[in-house]
Amino acid sequence: MAQAPLGDSEFDRDTAVTLREPGVYDTRLSPGWTIINALNGGYLQAVVGRALGDALPHPHPLTLTAHFLTPSKPGAAMIRTETVRSGRTLSTGQASLLQYEDDGSQVERIRVLASYGDLDTLSDDVRTTAEPPALPPAERCPSAADHPPPGPGDFSLLDRFDMRIDPATAGWAVGAPSGKGEIRGWFTLADGRAPDPLSLLLTVDALPPTAFELGLQGWTPTIELTTHIRRAPAPGPLRVAISTRNLAGGYLEEDAEVWDSADRLVAQSRQLARVPRG
Amino acid sequence: MAQAPLGDSEFDRDTAVTLREPGVYDTRLSPGWTIINALNGGYLQAVVGRALGDALPHPHPLTLTAHFLTPSKPGAAMIRTETVRSGRTLSTGQASLLQYEDDGSQVERIRVLASYGDLDTLSDDVRTTAEPPALPPAERCPSAADHPPPGPGDFSLLDRFDMRIDPATAGWAVGAPSGKGEIRGWFTLADGRAPDPLSLLLTVDALPPTAFELGLQGWTPTIELTTHIRRAPAPGPLRVAISTRNLAGGYLEEDAEVWDSADRLVAQSRQLARVPRG
């Protein structure tokens, strides 16, 4: 696959931010990251994460929480950042993604709170008991782009990835959901751009919702998404496993694990979402 | 056990906040919630959570994220809240816990971002695949207060709870950690005060750190803690299970699940913490 260099890839172009004044950034949200009727939350999180990485003294998000307030639209947006604390190994920042409504009023789309550090300075100790997800080879996994989610809508997002879903967890795509809240797959950006800490903020929210494998259809709006970036990923395809253990009271959590080609657990995330009405 | 009524319990007295002006609250942090050399993060989270519950139009935290910036001290503190968004079923707010240093300078201790709702209005549907932790009866579990963490320090916190640790996960207390990053136990407030959504913010951070069962000793500073409150807990003892699957690069995640006496998964949390030096 062609390897788009970092900095000149769809992901880098579409998450680019421009400094307007200290702590304030302009960006343009690309319609290419739309799924059904909204921009993907992982994409939006990556845009804000890039601005925070520029505003804070440390480069990499170690833990980033985003609360999704109103639906973002393709087009112009502004990110206001605040440096909450600057420490030696960690800095904490907050950011708001803002857009203008047609009536000229400014509306906040996302509020983010995050702590940044430098993943390149972490020690090499690994005492991880978690195991990478067991996945068939990518060539034996159907492409997510060939199996858009049920129902109408815009599936541009699927063209941004080479995403291969484990057939054992893709029953929803053929009308036979497993009833287990698990989906696993291979993930690479469509233009072959290598993963990095920023793109992991996208990857944790890229798979189809676990609700599909629970037999639920329709939109699963994310209320809050927290991502821990634990290590800079090695080049090569990522393996992503998402799971839901507690669907109750109209809400569900969705956990994601991302493993790199060196078998390292590079990201863990959890989101709280509304159960689809469907 | 005596049942301290809600509102007149250690927990309620020590997390009380007083409105100073719209959105701003005064409180007094109690030394009784100190462990080793710092106030417990769950206690601090509950204090801020109470202020947000008063400031926001919805009463219960559904998802609350706290970033711990500087060590809080017993004594006077102030909470500044901001209402980020008010919706029909959810409202989002932010809060800062502030204290004055001896030199008179004001320092931020904790920054919180949370979305609140009304747990009493949630639907009754439950499709949870998670199972409650298997625990021996409480009377066969040693009291955590009888097994303070290794090393010197102030263990006042342990007197606030009737906490019984599953012997299978208490090896650290007798110098024989299991090597598995799991600790399970029974949890009740010492004065019998019934659990509620606010006290769950404390409970998720009340057990000894999983690092102890991984053979590590010393202080495990929390960087960020996110808690989902999924249901108002039924009266009676809670079962808490905490686990760590990824210890690497000097950091670890610690997940907590809290189950109520009706076998409902009432809270899920995850924190990112530093690996103890010990």
Image (tube, coloured by chain):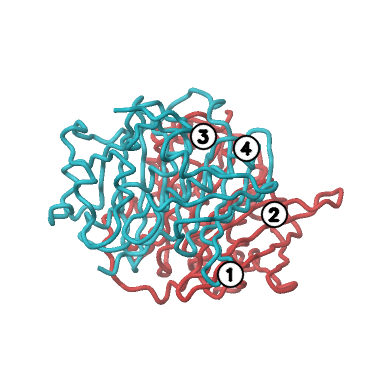
Chain colours: A cyan, B red
- For disc 2, the chain is B
The amino acid beneath tag 1 is Ser
C-alpha gap between disc 3 and disc 2: 28 Å
Q: Are marks 3 and 1 on the same chain?
A: no
Q: Residue at x 23, y 55 (%)?
A: A149
- Name the outermost residue toward the top: A124
Whether residue A25 is visible to the viewer of this picture, yes or no, is yes
- Residue holding disc 1: A105
For the residues beneath circles 3 and 2, the answer to whether they share a chain is yes
Tell me, yes or no, whether dots 4 and 1 are on the same chain: yes
Label 4 neighbour load within 10 Å: few <14, some 14-19, many 20+: many
Amino acid identity at mark 2: Pro
Q: Nearer the viewer, mark 4 or mark 1?
A: 1
Quadrant location of residue A137? top left
Residue that mark 4 sits on: A90
Q: Are marks 3 and 1 in contact (CB under 8 Å)?
A: no
Q: What is the count of numbered marks?
A: 4
Whole-percent x, y for residue A246 in the image: 32, 58
Crowd tier of the residue under label 1, counting other residues whose Cα lies within 10 Å: few below 14, some 14–19, many 20 or above: few
Q: Which residue is mark 3?
A: B251
